[in-house]
Image (cartoon, grey):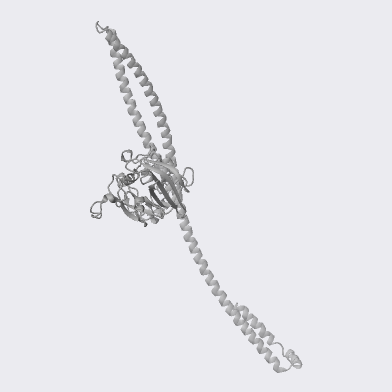
Amino acid sequence: MKVASLIFLGSLCAINAAPQTVTEVSALNTPQPTEARSRFAMLDDVRLLANGLLQLGQSLREFVHKTKGQINDIFQKLNIFDRSFYQLSVVTSEIKEEEEKLKETTTFLKANNEEIRNLSLEINSKINSILQERSNLQSKVGSLEEKLKDLSQSMMPLEQLQEITTLKDVIDSQEKTIKDLLMSVREQHEQLNSQKIKIKSLEEKLNYDPFQETAEKSSDPSPEAPELLEYLTSNSTDSTMDTNDFPTDCSEVFNRGQRNSGVYPIKPNQSEPFNVYCDISSDGADTVIQRRVDGSVDFDQNWDKYELGFGNLEKEFWLGLAKIYSIARQGDYILNIQLEDWKEEKRFIEYLFTLDGPTSHYTIHLTHLSGNLPDAMSNHTGMMFSTKDKDNDNHEDSNCARNYSGGWWFNACGDSNLNGRYTCTRSRSRSLRRKGIYWRPGRGSTYTLKFTKISIRPSS
């Protein structure tokens, strides 16, 4: 840029240094002072133009240096991205290789499972034939015994004695063979069960998403070890009050004039007194038996805790099967279930509700009444309560409470579990998603839930 300016200035100087004769000729036509002024004005313009061009060149040079620095930063970021993408592709390829190996192993185990099943069927057919032969032999022995009775007064022929001895030996050998076959069948069944367990574990590994589980663990609050909801004693109640005067449920609390929701002591018929949370409105009061709000309480508990009750009546809790039974046995009750999903959509459903006692493992009986929530509990009617240490569900090969987490009236692991693990996000892994709180009505959509509340009130 400077060279161009110098060339331009040189050309102007050359024009000013033209031959004297030309200058003299022009002097004859124009006045001398005006010519000098215009020449100085032209030089000033040239200087201004030169300075402008120099400043423009300096600005362009700074802009070029700045742009080069930005381009270098972009290249550095691109290099970092390339390295990260390469590392991610390596991890992805390793995961794919492990998944292929697991699929091959699953296929191999399924093939072995078919072979063992066919062998078991063959053994069963042999056992049936042996049992048939055994029954035939027993009938022959019976006929021979009748002959022996008829010949008891006379001497038995040697041939019959030999025949009887032979038949007894045959029966003994057949019984031994049957016992051996039964042992083989048991071993085959045990192998089948172990193969099924391996296949299930491999399927869970195939569906396992370590990145999602890490995200869930970091986002979910760690649940507390729940406190047990004990029965009230004389030390925990006002000694001046007669516990027999306590209301039998929250509807009676409402009838006695209470209009604020909260914790109240009750004493159902044939039960010790205990505290409950009464959800009171202008129309009446419901006895809350379960509530989930924030995952602060761990609901994956054993049978004893589910029977007695656990948690915090002001926040998250399970009232207890024995307490729920003591209330429900007093008459006809309605079960109200209120749910809210992570889209903050609230729905409810109501059932006519009865509950059997501890000898029937608290079997539940439900009849759908009303509500805007699709029915997902009617399939659970007639089911006993199950926990991870007491399996009462209808699934022969699995413990639903252990596999799905929490205690519930599981059918064959069923369409709902409101006592599952509280998760703040919807997992992409099926094996993790099924351990959460869900409501799946038939073939409809699955509701992953943020809030649940189960309460009961008298039907009349």
Choose between 146 and 375: the one closer to the eye. 375
Residue at (55, 74) in percent of width and height: 61
Q: Quadrant of residue 332?
A: top left
Picture quarter with the N terminus: bottom right
- In the rendered image, residue 303, in percent from the top left (x then y), is placed at 31, 44
- In the rendered image, residue 232, in percent from the top left (x then y), is placed at 26, 51
Residue 169 relative to residue 80: left or right: left
Residue at (57, 74) in percent of width and height: 60
Q: How many marks?
A: 0
Choose between 28 and 319: the one closer to the eye. 319
- In the rendered image, residue 269, in percent from the top left (x then y), is placed at 30, 45
Residue at (28, 13) in percent of width and height: 165
Q: Quadrant of residue 52?
A: bottom right
Residue 427 visible in image: no
Relative to residue 117, is residue 319 depicted above or below?
below
Relative to residue 295, is residue 174 depicted above or below?
above
Q: Residue lying farthest front?
A: 256
- In the rendered image, residue 166, in percent from the top left (x then y), is placed at 30, 14
